[in-house]
């Protein structure tokens, strides 16, 4: 599947870079103070998510999991918390950024955007029985709604749209159940693995709307809003759908599920025996899905965050995402603007 790639205008890059060209370099010796732990506790990262927690050192080393979380606030000069469905592109994206800004160590967390938002509000994470206080410098979601919440909290002012995507149905190789569209979700012989409506943006902002329009939401949810849960005899709500849904299909416990087309492409790239059922525009929401990103205010790494946002408007950044099937943003979308 191919997508057209919009060229990124050099003038756009200049506009974005101008705001940070003379910003001071942050010091590793003086990391920002850790956020105070609220009484309610930190947001909890589901188990076995080491590959979604990374610390990229400028010398090429990469730490994962709790080791990365433990060093991130101290060592990283830039920390990114990004909607998890782009995890497979981030090695290329981060290394392209480091090639333009040498010497910067980058921390990365790729999890459902609602879960990331909760961790920002609570000031940190709990993972593998340990607490890790701190917030990111840059946050990205699959919908502007999450960034509006940060604006309300006084934590973000500006944003840009940096890429697009579309939904498909993932099925087993050869589509043995003959699934052709969203309506097949209602068949008694079709078991589904769906993103959860609690914190996975693909369901919160897009999938649920399509299922409701087809009169299928009650059939799938069984009246429940939860994650890592069996909602009906035929449906499972995931915690991290981009990893669970292909694994459940391969294990034979699910027959189909809504995923981003980029996730289907990546699963096939990894050699997994899955196919994708393309949906019409009114169900794929190809013309509506937009990834929004912005820098948190008040941190000591704001200059590095500004450099990263400027980097996203470069051909190198857009090409790194396009390589994995994402649809590039247009020139005007890449310009920072106030969150409405």
Image (cartoon, helix red, strand yellow):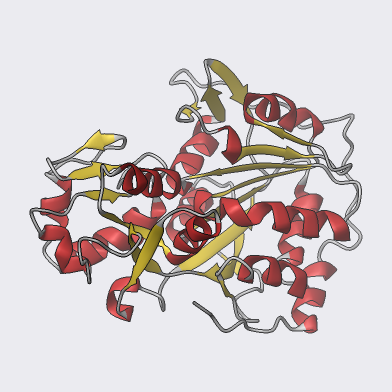
Residue 112's spot in the image, x, y percent? 46, 45
Question: Could one spot residue 118 in this view of the protein?
Answer: yes
Q: In the displayed structure, does residue 210 sit left or right of residue 92?
A: left
Q: Quadrant of residue 253?
A: top left
Q: Which residue occupies the foreground of this view, 90 or 72? A: 90
Give above or below for 235 relative to 309.
Answer: above
Q: In the displayed structure, does residue 174 sit left or right of residue 103?
A: left
Residue 163's spot in the image, x, y percent? 57, 69
Question: Could one spot residue 340 in this view of the protein?
Answer: no
- Outermost residue toward the left in this view: 188
Give above or below for 27 relative to 272.
Answer: above
Q: How many marks?
A: 0
Q: In the displayed structure, does residue 18 sit left or right of residue 229?
A: right
Which residue is found at the position 81% from the left and 52% from the top?
303
Q: Quadrant of residue 9?
A: bottom right
Q: Which residue occupies the foreground of this view, 254 or 144? A: 254
Q: Quadrant of residue 170?
A: bottom left
Residue 161's spot in the image, x, y percent? 57, 69
Residue 63's spot in the image, x, y percent? 73, 32
């Amino acid at each position: 599947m191919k997508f057209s790639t919009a060229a990124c205008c050099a003038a756009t890059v200049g506009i974005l870079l101008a705001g940070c060209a003379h910003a001071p370099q942050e010091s590793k010796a003086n990391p920002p103070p850790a956020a105070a732990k609220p009484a309610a506790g930190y947001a909890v990262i589901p188990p076995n998510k080491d590959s979604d927690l990374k610390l990229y050192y400028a010398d090429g080393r990469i730490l994962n999991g709790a080791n990365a979380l433990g060093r991130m606030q101290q060592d990283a000069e830039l920390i990114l918390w990004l909607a998890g469905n782009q995890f497979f592109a981030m090695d290329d994206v981060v290394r392209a950024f480091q090639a333009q800004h040498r010497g910067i160590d980058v921390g990365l967390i790729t999890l459902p955007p609602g879960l990331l938002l909760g961790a920002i509000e609570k000031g940190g994470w709990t993972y593998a029985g340990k607490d890790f206080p701190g917030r990111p410098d840059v946050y990205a979601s699959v919908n502007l709604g999450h960034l509006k919440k940060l604006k309300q909290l006084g934590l973000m002012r500006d944003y840009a749209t940096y890429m697009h995507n579309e939904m498909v149905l993932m099925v087993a190789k050869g589509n043995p159940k003959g699934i052709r569209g969203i309506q097949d979700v209602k068949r008694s012989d079709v078991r589904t693995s769906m993103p959860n409506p609690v914190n996975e943006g693909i369901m919160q902002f897009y999938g649920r709307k399509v299922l409701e329009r087809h009169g299928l939401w009650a059939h799938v949810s069984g009246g429940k809003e939860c994650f890592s849960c069996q909602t009906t005899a035929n449906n499972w709500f995931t915690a991290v759908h981009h990893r669970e849904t292909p694994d459940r299909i391969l294990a034979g416990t699910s027959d189909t599920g809504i995923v981003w087309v980029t996730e289907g492409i990546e699963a096939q790239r990894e050699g997994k025996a899955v196919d994708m059922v393309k949906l019409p525009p009114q169900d794929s929401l190809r013309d509506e899905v937009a990834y929004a990103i912005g820098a948190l205010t008040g941190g000591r790494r704001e200059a590095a965050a500004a450099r990263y946002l400027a980097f996203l408007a470069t051909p190198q950044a857009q090409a790194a995402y396009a390589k994995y099937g994402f649809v590039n943003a247009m020139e005007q979308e890449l310009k920072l603007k106030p969150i409405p």
